[in-house]
């Protein structure tokens, strides 16, 4: 089997096989790509990339005609979902519909997912916890067309986070070191994967560029440290202040010491991703650079890992790309069967049952009846939403009347740690504490301001969720933080 990890600047190829629980690597090759051939995961020149791969395989006399590919792109969306229990394609349809509805996605996305646990909803109903990914169809099509041109049978298209997960979870040494963060480092992007309770719980892909860091020659280290800090704050905010225990680096880890020094201020230990004992032949190549390609060779758990995007393509074709209509039609068919069964039972005691069934069927299928049923269902949904809204308003009213008043001392403290690159736009109370909206001149200033507040000794429980850009003046970076005055008192 040929396993290929494609990024915008390199192609990494593993020639190996998975057998009896182990990955045996025969050979490993790496080929740089010319700028512009691949952009954000999309292949811009399929014939030229195919020629590049073919030359590598021919030069090294690799004759296998089956392949797996690992891809990365910031166009791939990750979302944790709670989905009602179901079986087979019905469950797939539920996951597809829910992530598309939640994220506002169309049918031009392919959905893959991993089952990560079970939970219950507010009503106590059993739910399945899923980490789903939505990948643009045209991104998958790039690789289908690429391997068709190569004359190689493409067996799987996997997202890189799924591949590295199989490497990490195959190594029992990491079970007791969670929660931990696994960070892939490349010259043009970093990929952060958060693991907790022996499973992947969050993934984020970030493009990086020296221009975003004032042409700093050490921009990679700065970008890595900044995003690890954000992820640490994100994890704390979701887990009652609990901290990430360890960071594992892989990819381009030549500057491991500078990376370690940059992260040391967060109080998190760092290490390089180790080779699992289940990998044979690792001495032939640099494992940290080929970890995704190695991970793609592991056999997946078909019960929990629905991660092959080619299967998503096949499912979409079987369902005609319109799962919602299929579900709706299925619901009406089931309703029809139930109604037909009920009247069949009544026919035992009624001599003219055929006539009655015809009349009732005619009534049910009447456009006016269908319209009234839809209106009744919509009214029921609106009543539920109105009831939920009324409850939220009452809670909000109670919360507002209990809010304290911000005094000038706290505001002065917030301004004291501004460095000239950041200004405060607004300050308000929320359920989490004091929410401070800010605007900065650079993308590094938000993290600097958060660190200054954190070191001040005046504020604690600081939550920072990242920034957005797009302003028209020098202050083009918006962000917000949630803080509490130390001791928990804001008067």
Image (spheres, helix red, strand yellow):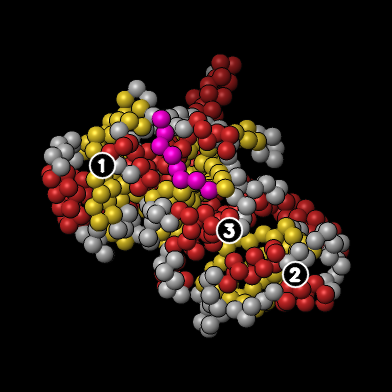
Q: Is 276 in the magenta?
A: yes
Label 3 to label 2: alpha-carbon separation: 22 Å
Q: Residue at x 64, y 70 (%)?
A: 449
Is 231 rendered above or below residue 340? Answer: below
Q: Residue at x 30, y 58 (%)?
A: 9
Frontmost of labels 3 and 2 is: 3
Residue situated in front as seen by the camera: 246 or 148: 246
Label 2 to label 1: alpha-carbon separation: 56 Å
Q: Which residue is mark 2?
A: 428
Which numbered disc flags the more N-terminal residue, 2 or 1?
1
Frontmost of labels 2 and 1 is: 1
Q: Residues within 10 Å of mark 2 (few under 14, many from 20)?
A: few
Q: Residue at x 63, y 32 (%)?
A: 126
Single out the residue that lies furthest toward the front. Answer: 257
Is 221 rendered above or below residue 87? Answer: below
Query: Bounds of the magenta span?
Result: 270-277
Which quadrant is home to the N terminus? top left
Residue 102 point in image, percent of width and height: 54, 52
Residue situated in front as seen by the camera: 247 or 265: 265
Frontmost of labels 3 and 1 is: 1
Residue 88 point in image, percent of width and height: 45, 30
Q: Assign a secondary structure to mark 2.
A: strand
Q: Which residue is mark 3?
A: 230
Q: Which residue is mark 1?
A: 28
Residue situated in front as seen by the camera: 196 or 30: 30
Q: Assign a secondary structure to mark 3.
A: helix
Residue 329 point in image, percent of width and height: 45, 39
Label 3 to label 1: alpha-carbon separation: 34 Å
Single out the residue that lies furthest toward the top. Answer: 348
């Amino acid at each position: 089997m040929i396993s290929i990890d494609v990024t915008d600047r390199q192609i990494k190829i593993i020639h190996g096989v998975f057998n009896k629980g182990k990955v045996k690597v025969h050979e490993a090759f790496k080929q740089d790509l010319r700028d512009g051939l691949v952009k954000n995961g999309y292949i811009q020149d399929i014939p030229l990339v195919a020629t590049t791969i073919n030359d590598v395989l021919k030069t090294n006399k690799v004759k296998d005609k089956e392949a797996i590919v690992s891809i990365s792109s910031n166009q791939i969306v990750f979302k944790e979902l709670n989905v009602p229990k179901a079986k087979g394609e019905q469950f797939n349809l539920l996951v597809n519909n829910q992530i598309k509805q939640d994220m506002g996605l169309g049918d031009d996305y392919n959905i893959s997912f991993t089952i990560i646990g079970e939970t219950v909803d507010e009503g106590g109903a059993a739910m399945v916890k899923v980490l789903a990914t939505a990948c643009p169809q045209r991104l998958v099509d790039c690789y289908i067309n690429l391997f068709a041109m190569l004359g190689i049978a493409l067996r799987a298209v996997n997202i890189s986070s799924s591949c590295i997960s199989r490497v990490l979870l195959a190594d029992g040494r990491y079970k007791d070191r969670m929660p931990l963060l696994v960070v892939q480092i490349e010259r043009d992007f970093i990929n952060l994967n958060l693991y907790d309770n022996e499973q992947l719980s969050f993934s984020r892909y970030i493009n990086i560029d020296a221009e975003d860091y004032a042409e700093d020659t050490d921009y990679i280290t700065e970008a890595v440290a900044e995003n690890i800090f954000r992820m640490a704050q994100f994890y704390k905010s979701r887990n009652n202040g609990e901290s990430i225990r360890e960071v594992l680096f892989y990819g381009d880890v030549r500057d491991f010491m500078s990376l370690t020094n940059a992260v040391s201020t967060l109080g998190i230990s760092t290490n390089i991703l180790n080779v699992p004992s289940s990998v044979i032949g690792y001495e032939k190549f640099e494992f940290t650079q080929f970890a995704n390609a190695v991970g793609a060779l592991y056999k997946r758990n078909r019960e929990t890992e629905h991660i092959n995007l080619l299967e998503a393509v096949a499912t979409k074709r079987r369902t005609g790309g319109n799962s919602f209509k299929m579900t709706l039609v299925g619901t009406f068919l089931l309703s029809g069967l139930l109604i037909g069964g009920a009247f069949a039972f009544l026919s035992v005691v009624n001599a003219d049952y055929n006539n009655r069934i015809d009349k009732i069927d005619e009534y049910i299928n009447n456009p006016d009846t269908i319209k009234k049923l839809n209106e009744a269902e919509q009214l029921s949904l609106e009543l539920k939403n109105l009831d939920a809204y009324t409850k939220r308003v009452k809670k909000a009213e109670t919360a507002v009347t209990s809010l304290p008043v911000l005094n000038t001392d706290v505001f002065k403290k917030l301004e004291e740690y501004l460095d000239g690159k950041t200004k405060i736009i607004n300050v308000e109370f929320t359920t989490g504490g004091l929410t401070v909206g800010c605007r900065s001149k650079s993308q590094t200033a938000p993290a600097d301001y958060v660190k200054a507040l954190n070191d001040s000794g005046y504020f604690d429980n600081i939550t920072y969720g990242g920034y957005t850009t797009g302003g028209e003046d020098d202050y083009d970076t918006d962000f917000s933080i949630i803080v509490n005055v130390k001791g928990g008192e804001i008067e």
